Image (cartoon, helix red, strand yellow):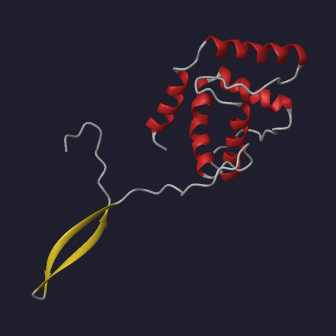
Amino acid sequence: MRKALIQTTAYWEMRHIDPADEAAWAAVISASVTTRQYIRDTSTGIAKQRAVTLIGAWNHALDKGYGSGRPRRDLSVDEDKYNAWKQAYDSETYALTSVALIHRWDIDGKPGGDDDSPALRQPTLATRTRRSTRSCAGTRAQVTSRTRKPRREWGSTT
């Protein structure tokens, strides 16, 4: 996944954090500490992600083998929702990693999510088609060949 896609998504949301967001975050934390309940699903962290989205994306990533080393979380358990939410609130690394997983989850149609999004076409490596004209037994025939665009090395001028 392109770094720019992850950064654009996260930093777009980060630029829209305002005092109302911070007040909602404080209310969620306070309610969890006092009542041990997750009161509502507000967006949080650098990328303003909701617990439902985080859990759906991470569970999907674990199922597909995109991620590992994390337990599956249950959307019906308040503690799991709060823990996912709090992790995004506390850790920018977790929040930014989650952005990529949310994009992958969205491509696959958000299985287990809170809406019925259709799955998108799976991304593939782009190839360029180069057409050349070659002479063939006195006639001119067009030949199409698929070539990969060569990678440019960092600092090269070509």
Q: Is residue 32 left or right of residue 2?
A: right
Q: Nearer the viewer, residue 153 or 114?
A: 114
Q: Nearer the viewer, residue 11 or 2?
A: 11
| Place of residue 136 in the rendered image (x, y in percent of width and height, measured from the top left) | 15, 84
**Who's the residue at 73% across and 13% down the image?**
26
Above or below, comparing residue 146 to residue 75 in the picture: below
**Who's the residue at 59% across and 47% down the image?**
104
| Place of residue 121 in the rendered image (x, y in percent of width and height, measured from the top left) | 54, 58
| Place of residue 92 in the rendered image (x, y in percent of width and height, measured from the top left) | 59, 24
Q: As drawn, which residue projects farthest toward the right? A: 35
**Who's the residue at 21% across and 76% down the image?**
142
Q: As drawn, which residue projects farthest toward the bottom? A: 137
Above or below, comparing residue 124 to residue 31 in the picture: below
**Who's the residue at 43% across and 56% down the image?**
125
Q: Nearer the viewer, residue 22 or 136?
A: 22
Q: Is residue 30 left or right of residue 7?
A: right
Q: Quadrant of residue 70?
A: top right
